[in-house]
Amino acid sequence: MYDKSDPRSSLQGQPKEAPTWVHKSFFPAQLGLFYKDEPQISDASGKTWITRGANFVVVYTEGESGGTFARDAQIDEYAIIIPDAETSLEITTEEGSTVVPGYSVAFVPPGKSSIRMLTPGRMIRFFTPKSEDLASKASNAAEYSGPHPNVPPFEPWPEPEGGLKLKWYTLDVPQEPGRFGRIYRCTTFMINYLDERVGPRERDKLSPHHHDDFEQCSLALSGTFTHHLRWPWTTNMDMWREDEHIFCESPSVCIIPPPAIHTTRAEGEGVNQLVDIFSPPRLDFSQKQGWILNADDYPMPSK
């Protein structure tokens, strides 16, 4: 359910495949409150908080200048958000080194790679749970010790012709009527860096909706938010759950499970910046002409 001013309202009414996932139980929302929780890693390179979902691991770092973060045998492609313009990184892969400026998104290929902080600052990395060393350190690792009841196993999207290489993209992209945020995708992730909102979101323009079979990771980078969740009633009353209204400061993540009806309201008087992450990428967003800013770099599945 979207307000007519919301670009996602154009998703409604499109042909939809029959549901393939039967919900036999519900799974609670997950939180990573990086502004108050203790970091999972604290060393000379900086402080790092780790929270996970079924198909992704969020690694939030406040890095020190010169801090290095290496992956010696990375199994698949991972993503990086550099949210602040004054932060810059040097990313080294088997093909060489590249300086990536702040206010950017980067996708790093499998294999050996390293990140060196050229300035102190924030970076947020996203891995699939195939990176078991990170997934096992997540603050909520125990919640995902078994299969998720409502999320199918992860399957990557196709690789581009010529293979995977380091790619990065600026977030300094002007708004465009009819486009929803600034969306970039790779083989493992879709990142939607939503347009910043100054002041609270209008109470009469919220967007309650649900997903059948994938989690949504909502990353709050600045401001405050309330995540509203409502689970559907089923014929089995034992599955019913109370509504939740989860207030989060920044930085934090709220991982919203299917099939909870959900919407998020920005609450802060200043800049409220939210980023939505999906793994694997969303097909419905990818099918919208002009929504994926790097669509030419990564092919869609053939079916």
Image (cartoon, helix red, strand yellow):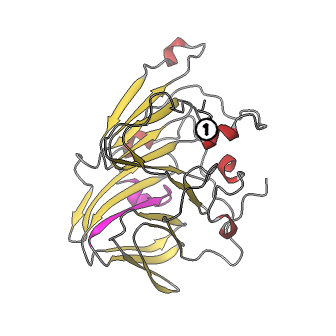
Q: Nearer the viewer, residue 106 or 154?
A: 106
Percent across and percent down for residue 161 are 72, 75
Answer above or below: position of 296 versus 236. below
In the rendered picture of this protein, how many numbered marks are placed on residues? Answer: 1
Give me the residue at 49% from left, 17% from top. 240
Q: Nearer the viewer, residue 65 or 92?
A: 65
Magenta residues, as a range? 120-136
Q: Is residue 60 visible?
A: yes
Q: Is residue 190 visible?
A: no
Give me the residue at 44% from left, 28% from top. 203
The outermost residue toward the bottom is: 96
Residue that badge 1 annotates: 213
Tell me if residue 95 is in the magenta stretch. no
Disc 1, SS: loop
Percent across and percent down for residue 51 are 37, 49
Query: Residue 84 vs residue 25: left or right?
Result: left
Query: Residue 209 vs residue 245: left or right?
Result: right
Percent across and percent down for residue 13 are 75, 34
Mark 1, other Cα within 10 Å: few <14 / some 14–19 / many ≥20: some
Tell me if residue 132 is in the magenta stretch. yes
Indicate the amino acid at tag 1.
Asp
Instruction: Tell me the quarter of the image containing the N terminus.
Output: top right
Answer above or below: position of 258 versus 43. above
Give me the residue at 47% from left, 59% from top. 127
Q: Nearer the viewer, residue 253 or 7?
A: 7
